Image (cartoon, rainbow, N blue to C red):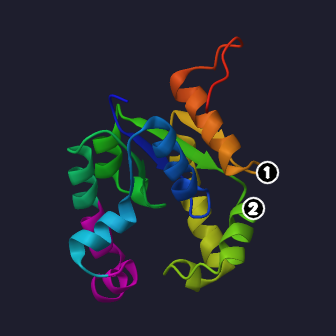
Amino acid sequence: MEQSLFLTGFMGAGKSSVGKLLARRLGVKFLDLDAEIERRERRSIKEIFETSGEEGFRKAEAEALGQVLGGPPSVVALGGGTLSRQSNRKALNGKLVVNLSASFEELYRRIRDTGDTRPLVRDGEEALRARFEERKPTYDGVGIQVETGGKTTEEVAAEVLSKILGPCPKEKRCER
């Protein structure tokens, strides 16, 4: 793979689980931007939000994104709000970005079922729905779209690979 693949989408869309599988199949490293932020900042996302607020977190996120963009080709799971900042969208312009989407109801079910405790989840379902609706136009503007609702991680990864590499020839059995 000559360039990094960036996965975006709302929390619960499958960026990390699909990203890890894609990285294995493509033979590259998987990076989770939130984990990179925690590593760089030497504190948790929760602590960053508590001490620096969302704006402080977004600043740290932009710095981590810049570092990832300068690194070797990888599969990168962006944070759910990474594209909310225009500077991040500009930095990713021309890069290989795939939006993993699902209905709010599907995403909320996934978030609830996993017991997610991220700061934005604690605000409750209605606040989360408002954030989803606020971000949806940005996600919808991403050039490559993959619907994840009702699909396994393997099916989503195969669809992403098909969209970025082209379909598998009928005469070959592709490991996608």
Q: Specify the segment rendered in magenta.
A: 44-61
In percent of width and height, residue 62 lies at 27, 58
In the shown orientation, is residue 81 left or right of residue 9?
left
Q: Position of residue 145 (x, y in %)?
A: 60, 38
- Residue depicted at 57% across the width and 79% down the height: 121
Main SS class of the magenta portion in the image: helix
User: In the image, which disc is placed on residue 150?
Assistant: 1
Any part of residue 150 in sight: yes
CA–CA distance in space, label 1 to label 2: 9 Å
Image height of 111 relative to 26, above or below: below
The answer to the question of whether label 1 and label 2 lie on touching residues, with beta carbons closer than 8 A, is: yes
Q: Is residue 8 above or below residue 112?
A: above
Residue found 35% across the figure and 56% down from its top: 85
Tag 2 secondary structure: helix
Q: Residue 122, image x and y in percent?
A: 57, 85
1 or 2: tag closer to the N-terminus? 2
Q: Quadrant of the N terminus?
A: top left
Q: Is residue 10 magenta?
A: no
What amino acid does circle 2 point to? Glu
Disc 1, SS: loop
Amino acid carrying mark 1 in the image: Gly
Asked if residue 147 can be seen in this view, the reply is no
For image coordinates 40% across by 83% down, the residue present is 46
**What residue did someone put label 2 on?**
106
